[in-house]
Amino acid sequence: EGLSLAPGLTGRALIEAAAPGLLRVIAISPEFEPAYQPLLSMAVFLASSDPPLARQILQQLRLLAPQRPEARALLEQLR
């Protein structure tokens, strides 16, 4: 099943629309870079404007892919 997003979404609206589907992919395949890297980028984008949402994405990544260090490292930077 592909990820379908409404056209014209940007910023936080795009993240809120895309993140759940990408997290579902990570739950199935934690090493899938085309899902993991965009989620990291979303968290970085949100770090200054919405730290709680950035932390939420990173915490979910850490939970779903605990063997990967990237989310943990970014989460430490946000504290």
Image (spheres, rainbow, N blue to C red):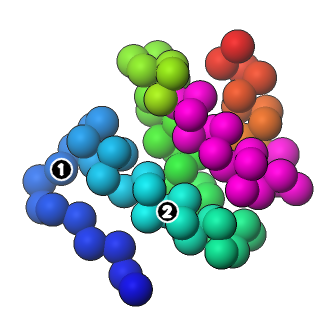
Q: Quarter of the image containing the N terminus? A: bottom left
- Tell me, yes or no, if residue 33 can be seen here: no
Q: Please name the predominant secondary structure of the magenta segment in the image.
A: helix
Q: Residue at x 54, y 59 (%)?
A: 23
Could you tell me residue 42's position as x and y percent? 47, 42
Farthest residue to the right: give it.
Answer: 67
Q: Name the side, left or right, on which 22 lies relative to 63.
A: left
Q: Is residue 46 magenta?
A: no
Residue 22, numbered circle: 2
Q: Which mark is residue 9?
A: 1
Report the span colored magenta.
54-69
Say whether disc 1 or disc 2 marks the residue closer to the N-terminus: 1
What's the residue type where badge 2 is placed? Leu
Mark 1 lies on a secondary structure that is: loop
Q: Would you place residue 60 above or below residue 33 in this image?
A: above
Camera-side mark, 1 or 2? 2
Question: Residue flagged by tag 1: what amino acid is it?
Answer: Leu
Q: Quadrant of residue 40?
A: top right
